[in-house]
Image (cartoon, rainbow, N blue to C red):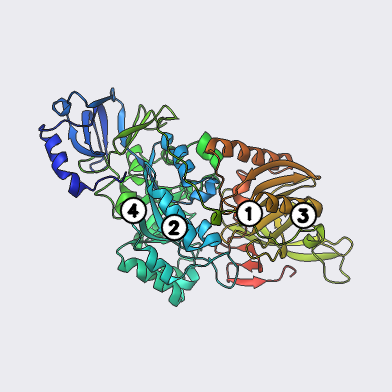
Amino acid sequence: MPLAPWSELAPRLVAVAMGREPADMLVRNGRWVNVHSGEIIASTDIAIVGGRIAAVGADLAYTAGPDTEIVEAAGRFMVPGLIDGHMHVESGMVTVTEFARAVIPHGTTSMFIDPHEIANVLGLPGVRLMHDEAMAMPINVFVQMPSCVPSAPGLETPGASIDEFDVAEAMTWPNIIGLGEMMNFPGVAAGDPKMLAEIAATQRAGKTVGGHYASPDLGRPFAGYVAGGPADDHEGTRPEDAIARVRQGMRAMLRLGSAWFDVASQIRAVTESGLDTRNFILCTDDSHSGTLVNDGHMNRVVRHAIAQGLKPMAAIQMASLNTATHFGLERDLGSITPGRRADLFLTSDLVTLPIELVIARGQVVAEHGELLIDIPPYEYPEMARNTVKVGRQVAAADFAITAPAGRNRVTARVIGVIENQAPTRALELNLPVEDGLVSGDRGQDVCQISIVERHRNLGTVTNALVSGFGYNVDCAVASTVAHDSHHMIVVGTNRDDMAQAANRLAEVGGGVVVISKGVELALVELPIAGLMSDERAEIVAVKAERVVAAMQACGCTLNNAYMQHSLLALVVIPELRISDLGLVDVRTFERVELFV
């Protein structure tokens, strides 16, 4: 059931605080991590009623009645529930329900999700499905309306599109908190009417505009982008990026996902340059299911920030109060104070941050890593399934890259993977030609990358080259998760394996598969929009681990290489990407030829 707003629950909150009525729950004798004052206050109790906090202070025993549930904090730290300020559920390969089940034991009680992955496949109806599922969760899952579908018009072809009228409609939905990351930063800086209309519709609704400025240029284009209205940004990778954003009135979101490690460099804006911590937010942006199950979620990010020299209080503020304040929800969540949702966890150590007990909306939901509540599965309709429409069997010949006539070597543009970062390098490498074809060069760590169109039954194949995966045997890795347009992306050293991988994903309705020498080494089925599984997160994590292990068996040594794989078609992050329309130089937002 929805949590009653503070305004409606106020009479009961007052009655409990005054001792006229008993609390539903009393958390006793903890150390209060007060993110408003920056203090840690010993011997504190928390009285909870109706899922909200009625009182916080010393010796609230008077609020306990015969039916009050007593939780003994026993001197442990009482910390506000952690908040992920920017993320995409689909990147965990699971539904919102399964994502919530996976992260609740890690102390996450609020998330701000941008479902632009499913929007690229199913459009506004897909966003509504995830919006409705989010509202059914026992924790707070707020939805940002996707802004850029397609992310780069004219450079890719998604399965659906979103416009300013869709944005205006979504702003009337009860669980839409703002506009998702505005990835078309050149469009904003150039005054693109559609992008500015989407921002205007969001601002008129009094909601927050998410940012995505994926460029190192902090000059005039950055000034134009900020003037357009985005209020935060998570694409920084350098200290100067964080500094520039905060100075211009934006919130700097520092991300630690499964493959993006951008906290360590940017937190120096605080630890070395001394910037005010109030305008910094921690987030994940993308977490693989294996990371969620085995390593954690926002607790992992907070621990990492502390390890970079940030004080524990500041790190916790960046994952709680700062985020709530940014989205205009500081009167509802983000702290352990009266009227706020009773979202908190108990821990015996603020540095290593073991999550020992989690309370969400006044209910004990997890303890010592175990989920204590049942969350019924959300049934996705048939329209969200069977979305891989290739239209034919793909053949090995579809992946052939023909060299210019008469050449025995070529200079080719090659996508260069950068480990642990979203950007790529635009390389130019000299490669051999065999029988008139360019197949890559294992000596230079170059293999093929291809996009198989999967939305309109066309089955067209676009071919290019990529470096950085380290594959040293005949193999192919294919995925229908290919940000942002989510065609099928295939990376391989052998065309027969590439064709087999593509056809296998068409057969199972989407997913990730690794083929080597004709043998299937690993498979994760993703039947919901080709993006999400309807299995439990623990099962998906095991299958995903097999994918990672299979990639390693083929010679790949990258950290979380699958996440790198899935981003290589994201034509809004420099420098070089591939789409269904060809090779894209994101520095100029222009299509370029494969051969120089």
Residue drawn at point x = 52 percent, y = 50 percent: 90
* Helix, strand or loop under label 1: loop
* Helix, strand or loop under label 4: helix
Instruction: Report how far apart the C-alphas of labels 3 and 1 lie in the structure.
Output: 14 Å
Work out whether mark 2 precedes mark 1 in sequence or the reverse, and give the earlier one.
Answer: 2
Q: Are marks 2 and 1 in contact (CB under 8 Å)?
A: no
Observer-side mark, 4 or 2, equals 2
Q: Nearer the viewer, residue 404 or 241?
A: 404
| Residue indicated by mark 4 | 279
| Residue indicated by mark 2 | 128
In the rendered view, does 96 fall on the left or right side of 43? right
**Residue 549 placed where, x, y %?**
67, 38
In the rendered view, does 447 fall on the left or right side of 39? right
**Residue 17 placed where, x, y %?**
14, 35
Q: Are marks 2 and 3 in contact (CB under 8 Å)?
A: no
Work out whether mark 4 precedes mark 2 in sequence or the reverse, and give the earlier one.
Answer: 2
User: Which label number is shown at residue 499?
Assistant: 3
What amino acid does circle 2 point to?
Arg
What amino acid does circle 3 point to?
Ala
